[in-house]
Each structure stands twice: as structure tokens, then as C-alpha cells.
Image (spheres, grey):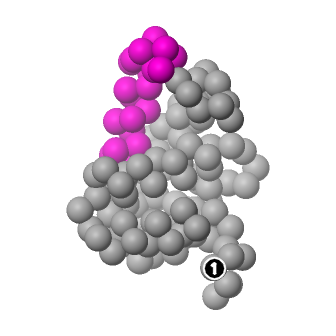
Amino acid sequence: MKNLRNLTNADKAKLLHELFPDEIPYLLDRIIIVCADLKTNQEQHRKTWDFGLMTFDMWLQLSEQVEERINKYRSSLVKSSKVFSDRLFSSFDYTVLFVNDRIVKYAQHNSEDEKFKLAVELLFNA
């Protein structure tokens, strides 16, 4: 196994999935809920948008891409850590920013598994 500092986002996602496979369906459900909220409440989100790295429209586009992948590959994403990491953490696009953000926020606000929360903190906030 690679040193923690040398893990890619895809490596981290694969490891998280392997350690906490039961958490993945709930994480995916929560991501879909957030994607729907962004789409439904665009004007409200635009007014309060303060993420300087990108515009709300860019974030919305990333959420739509992630939502499409989850809907298309959901069953495989739940079953396979490799599919989960390959489809949602591609190094070839910026959707990884959206998914990383959603994993951290899911751990902070939705997960009840303290070990999952610690793992997310270690892997994605380091």
C-alpha cells in the first residue's frame, strides 16, 4: 500500500469503499439529494454562493455529471470499490472536487458511524 501522502483521490475513494461498504449506498443517496436540491433551488444557491474557486454554474454542471454517473452505475458503484473510485474519482475531470466535498459533508452531517467520520477526516481532510 502507498504512503498516505502519496494516495490519489481514487486510491482514497477505493480504500474508503473497502473499509465502509455499508456506508456507500447512503452516501450515494445523499449525493443524489444534494444534486436535486442544487437543480431545484438554483436561484437561492446563486444568491448565497461563496465558493471562490468556481461559479455556481460550474458547480451545478459538476453535480449533474456526478448525478448522471450515479444513476447510470449505481449498482456497480455500491458493489465494487474499483468502479466507485474509477467512475467518481477520475483524474481527467473536475467532478472529483464535487464528490470529495460531498463525502466530507456527508461524514460531517449525515453519517452516524464515528469510524467512517474519522476515516474521511484522515483521507480527505489531510
Residue at the extreme top of the image, as rendered: 43
Type of amino acid under label 1: Leu
Q: Where the N terminus falls, by quadrant? A: bottom right
Residue 81 visible in this rendered orientation of the protein:
no
Residue 61 covered by magenta stretch: no
Q: What is the magenta segment's predominant secondary structure?
A: helix
Q: Which residues are magenta?
A: 28-48
Residue 18, above or below 104 = below
Percent coordinates x, y for residue 113 in the rendering: 27, 68
Q: Where the C terminus falls, by quadrant? A: bottom right
Q: Residue sitting at 39 percent across and 35 percent down? A: 34
Residue at the extreme bottom of the image, as rendered: 1
Question: What residue did someone put label 1 on?
Answer: 4
Percent coordinates x, y for residue 105 in the rendering: 41, 49
**Image mark count:** 1
Q: Give the structural element (helix, strand or loop) at label 1.
A: helix
Residue at the extreme left of the image, as rendered: 112
Q: Nearer the viewer, residue 56 or 10?
A: 56
Residue 4, above or below 87 = below
Residue 88, above or below 94 = below
Crowd tier of the residue under label 1, counting other residues whose Cα lies within 10 Å: few below 14, some 14–19, many 20 or above:
few
Displayed quadrant of residue 79: bottom left
Q: Residue sitting at 32 percent across and 63 percent down? A: 23
